[in-house]
Amino acid sequence: MELVYSLLLLHLIFLRKAIAALKLKPLPAGDLAILVLDDVLIGLDMANRLPIIDIIDNHFTHYQIFLMTYDREWFEILCEHFVESDKTNWKAFEFYCADDAELELPIFAERSKGRDEYIKRAEKYYQENDFKAAAVYTRSAYEAILKFFCNKYSVPIPYRDKPKNLKADEIWTEVKKFQRKGTTVAYVTPKTASAIDKAIRTVLNPLSHSRAVSTYRREVQYAIVAVKLLYSELK
């Protein structure tokens, strides 16, 4: 373990010195400024990665920054944190191989923000009549929307020793009653709250598990619409 800690410490020292050197001796105006970070933060936990990326984003605005990673969770967090709907500042792309008979085809696909991407995929699978896949992505969008809102507005949620033990239903209960500052008006309208509650009972919970349940096209459609309404009200 001591060796691991030593390597992480050296890694952080090198990164700090590299960033400091770029600030102390920036490239002359007009020069091509590119900053490539290839999984340089992989040794840090998630809580410490985003602040460093924020520093780079705020202080190296004249650089074209490339963040590359094999870590899927970190990639999703970056998409959620940086990629806006208009994609004016940051864009996200994923590279992977798709099998076609005996060939591996390289795929280069642009990604949206997590919430937007999940909704887009839910609608795609719905059109293809794969309702379980549509439901899973709808639930992913629902959970991402709730977490983003809680983080943005510091919504008080129940404490759990292990965050993974915090259920989405518990978060939803707090979000549903959370009020706009200085008012008694909730962010979520009663109509949308009712639609989400129905979607949870009929689609978001049942179809996210492996047990066999009856699936109805219209219920999945309503769930997608309800989550899109929630997104509109909370963002």
Image (tube, helix red, strand yellow):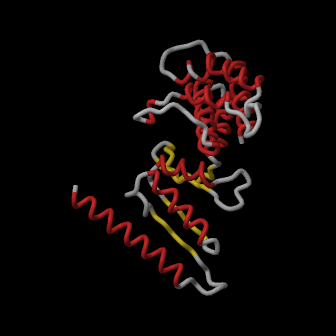
Rendered view: 64 above or below 230: below
Quadrant of the drawing holding the N terminus? bottom left
In the rendered structure, the answer to whether residue 38 lies left or right of residue 219 reads left
109 and 114: which is toward the camera: 114
Rendered view: 216 above or below 71: above
Residue at the (77%, 28%) spot, across then down: 189
The part of the image, by quadrant, that contains residue 128 is top right
Residue at the (57%, 68%) spot, across then down: 65
Q: Residue furthest bottom?
A: 28
Question: Residue 48, how many percent across, how many down?
Answer: 45, 56
Total numbered labels placed on residues in the image: 0
In the rendered structure, the answer to whether residue 30 lies left or right of residue 9 reads right
Quadrant of the drawing holding the C terminus? top right
Rendered view: 120 above or below 40: above
Question: Residue 56, how many percent across, how many down?
Answer: 55, 67
Q: Residue furthest top?
A: 214
Q: Residue furthest front?
A: 182
Question: Residue 163, how many percent across, how many down?
Answer: 45, 36
158 and 203: which is toward the camera: 158
Residue at the (60%, 48%) spot, across then down: 80
Residue at the (75%, 39%) spot, across then down: 182
Question: Residue 24, how many percent across, how many down?
Answer: 52, 83
150 and 29: which is toward the camera: 150
